[in-house]
Image (tube, rainbow, N blue to C red):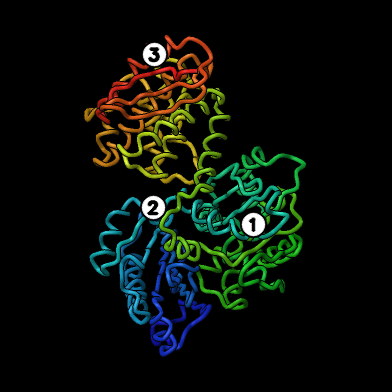
Amino acid sequence: MNTGNETTQNEQVTRKEVLPEAASETVRSFNVFPLAVIELGTSAIRMAVGESDGNSNVRVLEQLVRGLSLGKDTFTQGEIQRKTLQETIRILKSYRRKLKEYQCTDPKHIRIVATSAVREASNRIEVLDRIYTATGLSVEMIDDAEIARVTYLGVRPLLQSDATLADGLTVVAEVGGGNTEVLVLKGKDIVHSQPYRLGSLRLQQMFMHSQTTRSRMGSIMTDQIDRTLEPLLDIVPKGRQVELVALGGDMRFAARVVGVELHASGLSRIAVDELEKLTSKLLLMTVDRIMRKHHLELSQAETLVPALLSNLRLARLLECSQILITGLNLRDALLQGMLRSNDWSTDFCDQVVNSATELARRYQVDLQHARHVARLARTLFRSLQSEHRMDARCETLLYVAALLHEIGLFVGVSGYHKHSHYLITHSELFGLNEQDQQLVAMIARYHRRAAPKPTHELFARLDRDNRVVVSRLAGILRVAVALDHTGSQRVHDIECTIERHRLVISVKNSAGDLSLERMELRQKSLLLEDTFGLSVLLREAPR
């Protein structure tokens, strides 16, 4: 489809598949509809347009990129400048016209996200409001947890289709303009998920401010990259063979330059030695020369060397001889995600729990007790399903809070529930966005002592629905904790029934007298009674 005057020298267009207008109309008669994702990144504003029938994967029709360094404003001046905002609005208006050509006008089928460049700007609220006022487009700030989630869901099929990756240790990394997102997987299970404050634009700006010669650029950036990534080496077992999957357009550029064929779906490999040769050559070139030689725009040419050098150093630190490259990008993953009615699948929830388990282990939590409480809490949650009607997301939040409810003991015994809240809030948990992580922290905080109150500042900031979620799940967690008050798992299995406004917990095969559990339950069940309107009775099932 012709882009007309909207395709300028500052815009790169990639058409994966563009249907003629007549063909497009024919296809759409079979309930095919268009979808689009726009990403406000650190160095460019990108759009991907696709279509789907709602059941199969999205077929990408066109991708557009317009260079605009939002991150340069944020990372150097702390806010997005007026001129940059005006250019952002101009680009978004042109994208909106393009969407009309594809008949993509339903807001439910358009997702617009902003990454760290907007998220870290002090005037981000003003920026988002101005964009909405001028274009009618609503932009959401996507956090690191959401990026990690969609990245995992996007690369998982690729990893499972490769026998080596399906069972081995894999590091998935994407060097963005502001941060580097890293996932460490053992087979399909995530053992580490964290954004590192290492981005190509941050590195480029650091070099500019250092006022050093270009000949020293490589050593300065290498030192910074190594210092930032050093903690990752504590996660990856030494002497273990590791595969590195590198995402991002910079690595796809490198693969094309060295003659590596990129597969439409699947993984390609580039030798680390070849990447090092290319990076060394580019280090000696000025930005202008890189632009002319490789036909890149300014924003891409400026950040190309820092991005390639970051991937190269990561590969060297992990002792990899090759790097795996995929065509997947954030927009592709977000497009596919728009079809999923429920991202909280059993497999995804398991990955969230794995991440929480690793965090609990790091802070020396009694995992036997924590897992037992989590299992009891899950049984209670499912037994009360008819009363609360909460979904798999809430069940997972409860389970994670149960695993981590005693994490604060690492700091101290006194007021440890508040320490738990702090540690959970300030830790990295895969798959949980900022709001979900805050809910987990509050559920864990309210597993003992004072119940949630409107006078508690953080609780009062939540909207009504989330206040109800915290109160109900904290009430369930208190009962689960009471059932293992001694920490000896004497209450092995339970069955729960609701009889005449009463929750009856029947204990099967108890290992000893339950007097202590009954006494503790009388104190800890008040929050559940208040939120569900059910009294609680502990009963030993007949043998």
Taking the image as drawn, is residue 414 in sight? Answer: yes
Q: Viewed as shown, does residue 323 lie left or right of 365?
A: right
Q: Position of residue 161 (x, y in %)?
A: 66, 60
The residue labelled by disc 1 is 159
Eyeballing the image, is 201 above or below 262? above
Q: What residue is disc 2 on?
A: 119
Mark 3 and mark 2: Cα distance apart in space: 49 Å
**Cα distance in 3D space between marks 3 and 1:** 49 Å
Placement of the N terminus among the 4 image quadrants: bottom left
Sequence-wise first label, 3 or 1: 1
Seen at 46% across and 72% down, the residue is 65
Q: Position of residue 131 (x, y in %)?
A: 29, 64
The crowding category of the residue bearing disc 2, from other C-alpha atoms within 10 Å (few below 14, some 14 to 19, many at least 20), is some
Tell me if label 3 and label 2 are in contact, CB under 8 Å. Answer: no
Q: Residue at x 23, y 65 (%)?
A: 133
Q: Could one spot residue 204 in this view of the protein? A: no
- State whether residue 47 is above or below residue 173: below
Dot in front, 3 or 2: 3
* Direction from residue 147 to residue 100 in the image, left or right: left
Q: What is the secondary structure assignment of the residue under circle 2?
A: helix
Q: Position of residue 55 (x, y in %)?
A: 46, 67
Residue of label 3 = 518
What is the quadrant of residue 532 in the picture? top left
Expressed as whole percent of the image width and height from the top left, the position of residue 122 reads 33, 50
Residue type at mark 1 is Leu
Q: Residue at x 42, y 9 (%)?
A: 515
Q: Amino acid at mark 3?
A: Arg
Of all residues shown, which one is farthest toward the bottom? 22
Badge 2 or badge 1: first in the primary sequence: 2
Q: Quadrant of residue 70?
A: bottom left
Precedes in sequence: disc 3 or disc 2: 2
Asked if marks 3 and 1 touch (Cβ < 8 Å), the reply is no
